[in-house]
Amino acid sequence: MRSFRPLLIFWLTLLTVLAATAGVLHYLGPPRPLQPPAQDPAKLAQGDKVPVKPQPVASSAAPSPASPPIAAPPAPPVAAQELAIPEPDASMQEPAVSLPGRMLPKIADNGRTPAQAFAAAFDPTERHPRIALVIDGIGLDRSQSLAVLRTTPRTMDIALSAYAMPQVLDSLAEEARRQGRECLVSIPMEPSGFPAVEEGDKALQTGANPEQNRQNLEFLLSNIQGCVGATGGSDGMAGERFAESRQAFGDVLSALAHRGLIYLDPRPGAPPPDDPPDDPGSAPALPRVVDVVVDRPTSPDEPASAEAIDRNLATLEKLAAEHGSAIGLAGPPTPVLLERLAVWANGLPARHLVLAPLTAIAPPKPPAQDAPQ
């Protein structure tokens, strides 16, 4: 008689396997949707197209908590026209009588001075110690001058050389105004080493006729428009001998004050000027005085080293922290100077100091007058 036991065992085994498989499938749940393959960054760099995922129709429903947050668009930068310094206009110019075709800066009829009209934007509520830094010799080397405008903060002022080509001066001054950067006019003056060291045929000299000095000054002031003032820091020199002449230097300060311009004295520790002896009723404006010459060379034949520049900048910071403000002068620009200035400026916020244009540095207080007897 034929036995059914093997057949029974077969069906029992099959049913057991099917039941186990069903349990596993129920535990795992439905299959996940297929994901698109990851893109190879190297291939994308070579120009492979990234497939565009269809965007869902917008709805008013709140996004799912699992969805990644959508980044907000970056805040728009401050508009260039809000920082730009206005172009020179006829209200602050007058013809130079002795120089046909040239215009001199002047105070507008409403009392607005060039130092006010062409000042760089600066937050007057800023309470951190302020450091102004002026780079002179701008225009002598066009590539280095452009590097100044490209690599330094707009709050660093520039002083335009008297001996740069006119078209170069115009283009540099225009770019500086577009950035919102203040300009000064460099006034070459007789240096301490004269005549072995001289400042050129437009320099103001102690032995020159006062009328010739006046014409030279007017030529220099008419060389470029839209400046807040002038400086005797001319291409790395300081005009020490001329500034020691009470009469001649007083005439220059009076002329600048009459035209609404500030003066930056490049001689650290220079004493306040006396009133011009021939015009005691018209005292000149007290100039701002440089506290530190940042790149003063250690010898006439060698430029200042990076280490010397860093030491001088540290001194400038110390003076600003002690007195609330300080003024530095540097130039003409060199690669090492620009590199050290960039590093230094980037670290100022961490040291709770702020770069400021020269017009944001308060003028010195006039000397105390003796009480009448």
Image (cartoon, rainbow, N blue to C red):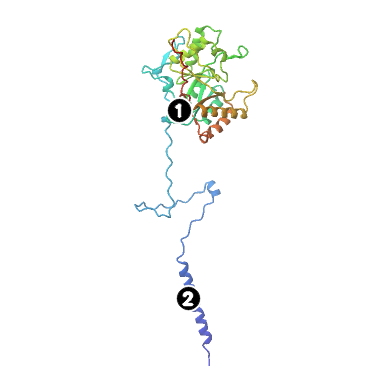
Q: Give me the disc on residue 208.
A: none
Q: Give me the disc on residue 178.
A: 1
> How far across and down, in percent of the image, does residue 257 sit?
45, 15
Give the amino acid type for the residue marked by disc 2 in the picture.
Ala
User: Residue reaching furthest bottom?
Assistant: 1
Give the amino acid type for the residue marked by disc 1 in the picture.
Arg
Q: Secondary structure at mark 1?
A: helix
Label 1, label 2: how many angstroms apart (C-alpha)? Answer: 81 Å
> How far across and down, in percent of the image, does residue 111 sit?
38, 18
Foreground of the two, 293 or 167: 293
Q: Is residue 163 left or right of residue 121?
A: right
Foreground of the two, 348 or 269: 269
> How far across and down, in percent of the image, does residue 122 sit?
44, 29
Query: Which residue appears at 57% of the width and 29% of the height?
Result: 314
User: Does 71 sit above or below residue 200?
Assistant: below
Mark nearer the N terminus (1 vs 2):
2
> What residue would you read off at disc 2?
19
Query: Which residue appears at 48% of the width and 23% of the height?
Result: 183
Callout 2: few (<14), some (14-19), or many (20+) C-alpha neighbours within 10 Å? Answer: few
